Amino acid sequence: MDSWEEACRSVDIKDEPEITKAQREAVVKASFMVAAALAKSGRPLTDGEFVKSCMMKVCDVVCPDKRQVFLNVNLSRDTVAGRVCDLATNLQQQLVRKGRDFIAYSLAVDASTALMSVFIRGVDSSLCVTEELLGLRSMHGTTTGKDLFEEVSRCVNDMRLPWDKLVGLTTDGAPEMCGEKSGLVGRMREKMREDNCTGELTTYHCIIHQEALCGKALNMEHVMSTLTRAVNFIRATGLNHHQFKSFLEELGSDLPDHTQVRWLSQGKVLKRCFELREEICRFMESKGEDTTELRDKEFLCEVAFLCDLTSHLNALNLQLQDRGSVVTDMYAAVRAFKVKLRLWETQMLQGKLSHFPCCQTMKEQVSTAVFPSARFAEKLSILGGDFTHRFADFEAQKSRFELLRNPFAADVESAPTNIQMELIDLQCNDSLKAKYVSVGAAQFPRFIPDTMPQLRSQAAQMLSMFGSTHLCEQLFSMMKKTSHRTRLTDELLHSILRISSARSLTPNIDELASMRCQVSGSD
Ligand SMILES: *[C@@H]1O[C@H](CO)[C@@H](O)[C@H](O)[C@H]1NC(C)=O
Ligand SMILES: *[C@@H]1O[C@H](CO)[C@@H](O)[C@H](O)[C@H]1NC(C)=O
């Protein structure tokens, strides 16, 4: 049977004409497209061979006369890997070209994992925003502020971006990042001073890393570590326990340890821990574990408090992660959150817990004397202070943000001198006012005429500022998805991540395919 099929095939092939030049280009283009799809989906590159085998099966049924052409689509692992690198290089070249037109840009840097990532958000003179991965570097050992600065400098210089167009810097808030002297922020400011840059660098530390907030600022790390120990115990021994099955599934494959409690910051997990508190204790007791601490009333109140607070922080985070939002929206969200914190503090002191449902539950179970209202109110106050500190640069830029949020209501006298004339012209122009009303604050800057260059430049700076380092976070989860990464070289891993994180740019596959055909004649 097999040999009969073989015989038929060889006859087929003999009858088949050689593939034409146009077909050859199509075949190369197809392999680029499959390589891009594999990279985007985070699948192993060896899946190319499987795709090819499926393709041949489909071809044999649907269009057997095209067999020879399909056979030429090379999807071997090495070819796919080569294509992936070409695609990433193409994206990088496009970004360099775009970067030449940026009139303002911001950077977001994250080094919370072994992979340091730098994202850029650049705005060109027509106020179009390009948001892309600028650079990646696998970090080994401890990372210092100097390492970070050198890496970021390299990215900026490789792209030949002028330092005086840098307006914003978002970091993950780690000390080596935000240190004013030897941290990345301090060194960037120093570099800009050396280069005689006139603009201010607006920096802030994003709140995505909530464990830092909840743990360190609130001094509640002991709650996290006790819960982490309990969860690790269940993970090790209770995998088949029906009550924990879905709980453990929610945890996913993240292996928590006592130093990294990133998973706990996902409010959902914390909430499940709170809901399952009785089951967790009973299970651990059945295994002979000591649960004195887990059963402690005050400890449970603290878990409830963290649970409520992280759910509020998560809601804020979601607002901040909205891709379409600009820095003014973000500023509004942060300001609102600060107001809420003050309200919660007052209500906590008064024993009104409607915005803290888990605390409400606990308070009903323990006596009012046990529930530490005053201590929690103080923690809310500390968090408010931490927010003020984190967003201090924001506060300083408040008038600038507000100016662009509603330029028609802005007070000309208190506006920066260099924009006062343009601002008056703008405010007195009825057709621009009508435009503002019809398109809204977020879109309006694009309609500020070229005759108002200072206002346009202000708008570009504002548009370039990052909402948050959510891009870095997304990259991190994509990296996790690329679970076969251990077998990848750094270059290949970085290429895959560049392709899968691409937002504003798409690889120019036509160009790549025709180039490839010219170089090799066939492929
Ligand atoms: C900055 O200004 C100082 C003093 O005018 C000058 O000596 C120095 O060369 C300038 N640096 C750059 C990078 O332009
Ligand atoms: C108002 O702005 C529009 C749009 O830029 C412009 O065409 C028009 O000349 C301006 N009108 C005045 C009176 O400046």
Image: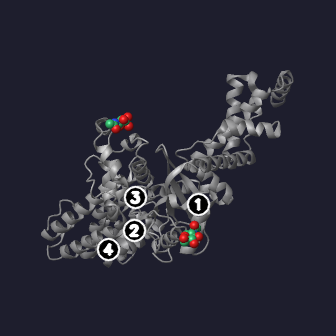
- Image quadrant holding the N terminus, namely top right
- Image quadrant holding the C terminus, namely top right
Percent of width and height locating residue 319: 34, 52
Q: What is the CA distance from the residue labelled 4 to the residue labelled 1? A: 36 Å
Q: Give the amino acid type for the residue marked by disc 2 in the picture.
A: Glu
Query: 335 or 1, which lies in front?
Result: 335
Counting residues from the N terminus, which is met first, the one under dot 4 or under dot 1? 1
Percent of width and height locating residue 394: 35, 62
Disc ID at residue 218: 4
The residue that disc 2 covers is: 211
The mark closer to the camera, 3 or 1, is 1
Name the quadrant where ligand 1 sits. Answer: bottom right
Counting residues from the N terminus, which is met first, the one under dot 4 or under dot 2? 2
Q: Give the amino acid type for the residue marked by disc 4 in the picture.
A: Leu
The mark closer to the camera, 4 or 1, is 1
The residue that disc 3 covers is: 247
Secondary structure of residue under mark 2? helix
Q: What is the CA distance from the residue labelled 4 to the residue labelled 3? A: 26 Å
The mark closer to the camera, 4 or 3, is 4
Q: What is the CA distance from the residue labelled 3 to the residue labelled 2? A: 20 Å
Counting residues from the N terminus, which is met first, the one under dot 3 or under dot 1? 1
Do we see residue 301 in this rendering? no
Q: Give the amino acid type for the residue marked by disc 1 in the picture.
A: Val
Do residues under tags 3 and 2 come within 8 Å of each other at their CB atoms? no
Q: Give the number of marks.
A: 4
Q: Give the amino acid type for the residue marked by disc 3 in the picture.
A: Phe
